[in-house]
Image (spheres, rainbow, N blue to C red):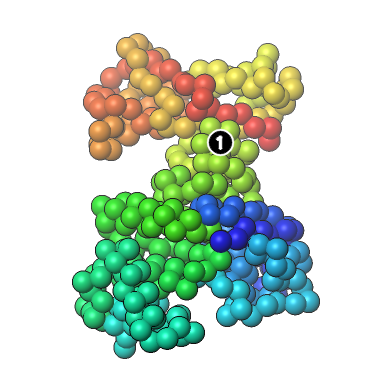
Amino acid sequence: MSTVTLSNVRRLYGATAALDDVSLTAPEGRVLALLGPSGSGKSTIMRLIAGLEPLDAGEVRIGDDLVSTPHRTIPAEARRIGMVFQDYALFPHLSAGANVAFGLDKLGRAERDARALAWLDRVGLKHRAHAFPHELSGGEQQRVALARALAPAPRAVLLDEPFSGLDPVLRAELRDATLATLAEARTTTLFVTHDAEDALQAADRLAILKAGHVLQEAPPREAYDKPASLDAAAALGPINRFDGRVENGVVATPFGAIAAPHLAQGVEASVAVRAEAIALRPGHAVRVRDVRPHGAHDLVRVEAQGLVWRALVPARATLGERVDIEIAPTGAFAFAR
């Protein structure tokens, strides 16, 4: 296990900066989730850590070892980094057991086979050791890939969108099982995802990226409750946005005033209000324009003065009714524009 650190990293593709002055830390034995849309730089970070690409500025360290600078890149095979890809990348001509044993070539045959079987047992697939990848389900292939990454005792493991191709129920089950395995092994983990729920559920620390920049790095609860910017707030769930001016410490919106005591009088501000921070109360101020079931909650669109906001509220709201709304201060944020 080792801490993985990126310091002021820059990576260019032609004239385009895929990463620009990125610094972040994956703590030893913990999970750092990299959250952001396609093109935000998540997978580029993974490739730099793995040693699959050079960098143009900054440095990458694994533990105390300096593994990447603009002038020197230690080869991938010398870094002791495990990887689990989105498509799992299992060798189709090898059984599950042989796939896990593949990275254990420095061991004797008997010890190699025993360790591979032990890791398959840890992920619940000992009974499938002789099955080939095409005979395994998507979830089973993912678990074999995880066992293969962990068997050589890597210094860190990189998970690149490992659950994206799975149905929602299996996705949640496999995510929880994977995290349990990583926690038991006390493995330093970097986990790439574009899914906010996965990031919040999986991470000990969370790095939110956009267009090659780190918007915020923090524990998940802090990132959710105290977003550093409008984009950081939007990355972790649906928000309602309103642009206005700070007057007497608040920004007035058609749905109510949002506190902005940290912003100066008269400053132009953008407000973000989480959908789940809005509660409906008996009244007449706003109209319910749309109601959609969302599990135990309803996703409701409410209108005031021509502006429509979304609210995630306990079922059941009634289409067309008039209500008042109450905004929880913990889910409302104001940022200077």
* Mark 1 residue type: Glu
Q: Position of residue 35 (x, y in %)?
A: 52, 53
Considering the image in quadrants, where does the N terminus appear? bottom right
The one of 255 and 98 positioned closer to us in this rendering = 98
State whether residue 5 is above or below residue 240: below
How many numbered circles are shown? 1
Above-or-below relation of 249 to 184:
above
Q: Quick one: 253 or 332, which is closer to the camera?
A: 332
| Left or right, residue 242 beside residue 129 | right
Q: x%, y% of residue 116?
A: 35, 75
Place of residue 22 in the rendered image (x, y in percent of width and height, measured from the top left): 69, 57
User: Which residue in the rendered view is the most extreme toward the top?
Assistant: 283
The residue labelled by disc 1 is: 222
Which residue occupies 47% across, 63% down? 159
Residue ID at (66%, 24%): 245
Where residue 232 sits: x, y (%)?
57, 43
Q: Up-down: is 105 above or below 156?
A: below
Up-down: is 26 above or below 139?
above
